[in-house]
Image (spheres, grey):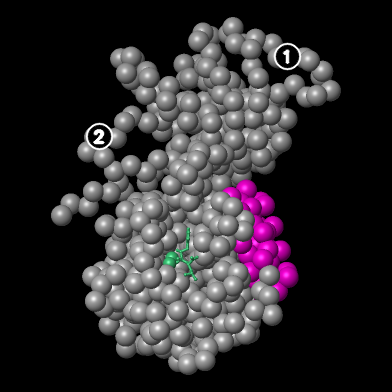
Amino acid sequence: MRNPLPPVPGKLLEIEVSDDLRRGTPLATLIVAPSEEDGDAVLEEIGGVRPTGKAGDVQTVPTGDVRWLAGVGDGEPRHYRKAGAALVRAVSSALGDDVKAGLKAFRTFAVELPADAGAEHVEELAFGLLLGGYRFTVTADEPKPSVRTVRLLTRHERAVPAYDKALERVRELAAAAAFARDLANAPSNIKTPAWLADTVVATARAKGGLPNLTVSVRDEKWLAAEGFGGVLAVGGGSAAPPRLIELEYRPRGATTHLLLVGKGITFDTGGLSIKPADGMHLMRTDMAGGAAIIAAVRAIAALRLPVRVTALVPAAENHVSGSSYRPGDIVRHYGGKTTEVGNTDAEGRMVLADALVYGIKKHKPDVVIDAATLTGAMKVSLGVRTGGVFATEDALAERVTKAGERVGEAWWRMPLLEDLAETVQGSLGDVRQAPGGPGGIVAALFLREFVGDVPWVHLDIAGPARADKTYEDVVPGATGFAARTLVELVASYA
Ligand code: BES
Ligand code: ZN
Ligand code: ZN
């Protein structure tokens, strides 16, 4: 059967800086809103349109050189992301209208930067431009014409090198978020564990590969021989067998070694503890943690960060069948520890436990980071725009939240409450999988049983991994959340 998916990873806009104010390219101008101190001041009309300057407002100008006015609010860098995203969406729809009206489709548009825009403003604008127009569709129609290039125009020739440097980094970060979105958005009838593994192998090899990056894939036979009981239990109910994906990035001269582990559940029905039908379709993004890690490692290699990184994604489908694992089962993980299964829907921690023990034993990393759409409880606690951070060390938690701030992803630290630690202790087995209590915390305490004394941080992204609304550079569907933070976090060890 033909694979009906668009190429993964998909292509992003090209973005370039120029001080050559060529005519003929559709042009957008960024508008700073009048501040309160200006009283009731209004901005001067442009082509008969009075600009608002409100962050995220895009106004169309019917005549003259400038075609769009994009508000950047008070001009703070974070408003530039909103403006870039809203602008690229407006430009794409204008392009569609042009085509419908029989006009020649433009492929490039230009954005005039304000004279005082710094590298930070350009970074934020670029995130918005690159990701705000992201789409993932699988249709019979030929893809519609789309914008290919955006040119950022500055009158300050001397600013160009600084902007270019900022863009180099943003391009990779945005590509990582988009790649993570592509993987998580892919439908689960295509996205089996084997498809995920093959896609990672193919992307790592594309265009001659990336320096110092290797991928290996282990199948269900290898997993059985090595004793990955958690992955096999969860994956056992599906006709599509599990895989373990391992990426290794080994730049010469690196001293620090980080282990990243991502939940790779390609679909989560809940298993025998089956989920309600409403919203079950959303569980195609239950490998968003794994996707963020895969995409981050690719960007880390592309940016040639001087930090050694090993990534593990245990990939399995949590399905219902005569070979599903059951509540009440006792499962032996890699390394020997046993888990008493309470609820087959708590499958993420089952696969992560194996991978954590394996990765720590094999690689002896300095720090371990895991990312997972682990608990619905986390979504209740922090909503859908903030990720939960559980860390064994204060400095590590802070490193994550700071890295997130630098790339525009919000994190909030959650406690590993000691008074709940005994609830994950087993009576028949070593550990209890789903003892009840505050879900996000208990899940984190379960995972902690498998990391020993290596500094460890667990990222629960069940909330922000997907969106049902458009906001900033996010569109409905998978958000790619955590990919950018992970790249930035790894960069902080360089
Ligand atoms: N994949 C879900 C968590 C989830 C929920 C992610 C909503 C995104 C949105 C996870 O596997 C799960 O089902 N967790 C259970 C655990 C419970 C049975 C202990 C949950 O959170 O309800
Ligand atoms: Zn799940
Ligand atoms: Zn589940």
Q: CA distance from mark 1 to mark 2?
A: 44 Å
Q: Say which residue appears at 32% left-offset and 88% top-offset.
A: 225
Q: Which mark is residue 437?
A: none
Q: Which mark is residue 142?
A: 2
Q: Say which residue appears at 41% left-offset and 30% top-offset.
A: 147
- The residue where tag 1 is placed is 42
Q: Nearer the viewer, mark 1 or mark 2?
A: 1
How packed mark 1 is, by other alpha carbons closer than 10 Å (few <14, some 14-19, many 20 or more), is some
Q: Say which residue appears at 68% left-offset and 38% top-offset.
A: 77
Q: Say which residue appears at 33% left-offset and 29% top-offset.
A: 145
Q: Quadrant of residue 158?
A: top right
Based on the picture, tell me whether residue 447 belongs to the magenta stretch: no
Question: The magenta stretch spans which residues?
Answer: 385-414
Above or below for 136 versus 102: below
- The residue closer to the viewer here, 164 or 38, is 38
- Of callouts 1 and 2, the N-terminal one: 1
Residue 68 placed where, x, y %? Answer: 54, 20
Residue 163 placed where, x, y %? Answer: 62, 39
Q: Quadrant of residue 308?
A: bottom right
Residue kind at label 2, given as amino acid type: Glu
Q: Is residue 107 left or right of residue 20?
A: left
